[in-house]
Amino acid sequence: MTLGLAAVGRFPWKYVPAYWLAQILGAVFAGLLIWGLMPEGINLNFGATIVSISTSLPFAFIAEAVLTFLLMLVFMSVATDKRFPSAASGLAIGLTITVAYLMLGTHTGASLNPARSIGSAIVAIQVEPEGIRQIWLYILAPSVGSIAAVSLYESLRLKEFAKNAPEDLPSAG
């Protein structure tokens, strides 16, 4: 989300590296916490996202990009638009993540978040190196989906604003 928002000027680029670092460190900490609290988590690769053997990489890439696109579109619609009741934002976003997980959980792990995949891959590297080998997919696909969604949303929103603008607006010149 950070990348998508920054790409259209809704988040300052100067803060992006710090946000990414914080998100990745949070994901690493979560993986270590799983390891510490549930040593049997090693059997689940500490939550590392890897493409299942029955799923092709092209399908996984497209699916992660499309569902990240949908998540970001919902986020933009409910969390950044004042016309949507803020009390329902969490529900809309949570339901979107739930649907994404139900659709992709067994195929890709339904990451939709590069930091989440990077963090768990770092923790799981000693038991499941495939997480690091496939990390490109979990960085690129959500980035593509996020930027596409925010760009589409901003484009549609600007058109709507122009369509509803009063006729008597003063000119900028």
Image (cartoon, rainbow, N blue to C red):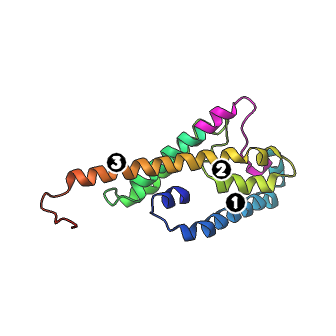
Q: Distance between the residues labelled 1 and 3?
A: 33 Å
**In front here: 148 or 30?**
148
Nearer to the camera, 82 or 137 = 137
Q: Kindly identify which residue carries mark 1.
A: 27
Q: Nearer the viewer, residue 155 or 85?
A: 155
Q: Which amino acid does label 2 sit on?
A: Ile
Q: Is mark 1 on a helix, strand or loop?
A: helix
Residue at which label 2 appears = 139
Residue shown at 34%/56% (left/top)? 84
**Residue kind at label 3, given as amino acid type:** Leu
Give me the residue at 18% from left, 65% from top: 171
Question: In the picture provided, is 11 more to the left or to the right than 121?
Answer: left
Of labels 1 and 3, the one closer to you:
3
Q: In this image, 6 relative to 57: left or right?
A: left
The percent position of residue 45, horizontal first and vertical second, equals 79, 48
Verify whether residue 153 appears in magenta. no
User: In this picture, which residue range is highlighted in magenta?
Assistant: 45-62
For the residue carrying disc 3, how many other residues have a C-alpha within 10 Å: few (<14), some (14-19), or many (20+)? few
